[in-house]
Image (tube, rainbow, N blue to C red):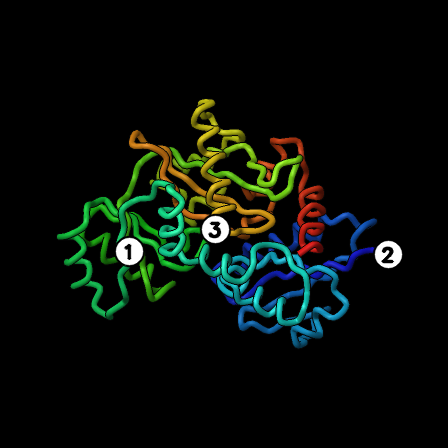
């Protein structure tokens, strides 16, 4: 008898489109001999749909053995849908309620990284007081520039920008506040970007680190922005062109974050390699699974496929 897998995709977040693609990729790559996939679509307003019909979540999930969570961003990645699935008694892929909520908040994640002894950039959290001009003046006088401005909650670098001067800072604050009421202003650290995926209980290791991927943004982008990610111009080196020492340290740090924050099944941590050392940026508890996404490329580099990954994660979820 095949395992019924409900693939959750869409959702009320700024990463709606990416989530649809990740979910489609999961549906396409599930082994039909083992699994009976069920496409569960959540619209932008949070309405659940099954077979194109709006239904309550408990109806959509009726008979589902495992929910594969492919919803990036708010609700899918911040502990919201995890809380619902636990209340309904449905096994699901990915991290639990509290670790998901913590990892989705960049400020809380940085605090956890510091606790774990992982290097992070200097930064401050600011609230939206309705006067971005005065706030920008205060920050420009007191904070080193260039600075990188990020919404405290969110993913895919949505609302993230670099500011080199006052006017760029004010504009970046406005864009970030449009995504989140709290914004993280960080020292911009120039260097090479890397990302490392971690899988639980894979190939005999409690936490298995995939090969570090080096991310090279297009020439006209200063960092791996949302526009750079989906412009089609970004270059990745899989595996990255790192020394043996750098590779080992990146893998160690990614496993430290994954295990230290209590994440489950899989995650992907992002880093900057600068002359001052390796800085942790953030962790993604539900990284993209599209053809363009970094995790599937890293899986391929270690001789695994997306289908094998999906099977492994679903089996982990059934043991939850």
Q: Quadrant of residue 190?
A: top left
Q: Is residue 8 visible?
A: yes
Question: Which one is closest to the eye, mark 2 or mark 1?
Answer: 2
Image vertical order of residue 154 relative to residue 278, above or below: below
* Residue ID at (28%, 43%): 188
Q: Label for residue 172?
A: 1
Residue pushed farthest top? 244
* Residue ID at (38%, 63%): 179
Residue 301 image point, x, y percent:
60, 31
Image vertical order of residue 255 relative to residue 124, above or below: above
Residues 152 and 91: in front is 91
* Residue ID at (56%, 35%): 210
Q: Are marks 2 and 1 in contact (CB under 8 Å)?
A: no
In-image side of 35 versus 156 (left or right): right
Residue holding disc 3: 261
Residue holding disc 2: 1
In-image side of 291 versus 187 (left or right): right
Residue 169 image point, x, y percent:
23, 54
CA distance separating discs 3 and 2: 36 Å
Residue 236 image point, x, y percent:
49, 34
**Which quadrant is home to the C terminus?**
bottom right
Residues 123 and 116: in front is 116
Residue 62 image point, x, y percent:
74, 70
Question: Which one is closest to the eye, mark 3 or mark 1?
Answer: 3
Question: Which one is closest to the eye, mark 3 or mark 2?
Answer: 3
Q: Label for residue 299?
A: none
Q: Earlier in the sequence, mark 2 or mark 1?
A: 2
In-image side of 193 versus 72 (left or right): left
Residue pushed farthest right? 1
């Amino acid at each position: 008898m095949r395992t019924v897998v409900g693939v959750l995709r869409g959702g009320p977040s700024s990463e709606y489109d990416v989530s649809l693609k990740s979910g489609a990729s999961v549906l396409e790559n599930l082994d039909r001999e083992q699994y009976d996939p069920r496409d569960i679509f959540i619209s932008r307003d949070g309405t659940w749909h099954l077979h194109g019909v709006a239904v309550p979540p408990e109806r959509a999930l009726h008979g589902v053995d495992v929910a594969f969570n492919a919803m990036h961003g708010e609700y899918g990645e911040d502990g919201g849908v995890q809380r619902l699935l636990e209340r309904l008694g449905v096994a699901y892929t990915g991290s639990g309620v509290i670790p998901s909520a913590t990892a989705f908040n960049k400020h809380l994640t940085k605090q956890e990284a510091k606790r774990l002894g992982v290097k992070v950039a200097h930064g401050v959290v600011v609230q939206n007081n309705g006067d971005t001009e005065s706030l920008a003046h205060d920050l420009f006088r007191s904070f080193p520039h260039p600075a990188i401005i990020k919404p405290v909650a969110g993913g895919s670098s949505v609302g993230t920008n670099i500011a080199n001067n006052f006017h760029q800072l004010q504009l970046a604050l406005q864009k970030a506040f449009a995504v989140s009421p709290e914004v993280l202003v960080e020292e911009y650290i120039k260097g090479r970007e890397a990302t490392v995926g971690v899988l639980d209980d894979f190939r005999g290791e409690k936490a298995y680190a995939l090969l570090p991927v080096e991310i090279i943004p297009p020439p006209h982008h200063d960092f791996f922005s949302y526009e750079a990610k989906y412009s089609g111009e970004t270059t990745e080196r899989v595996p990255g062109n790192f020394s043996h020492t750098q590779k080992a340290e990146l893998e160690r740090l990614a496993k430290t974050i994954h295990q230290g924050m209590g994440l489950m099944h899989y995650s992907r941590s992002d880093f900057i390699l600068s002359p001052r050392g390796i800085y942790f940026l953030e962790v993604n508890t539900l990284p993209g699974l599209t053809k363009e996404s970094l995790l599937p490329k890293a899986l391929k580099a270690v001789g695994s496929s997306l289908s094998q990954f999906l099977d492994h994660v679903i089996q982990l979820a059934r043991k939850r």
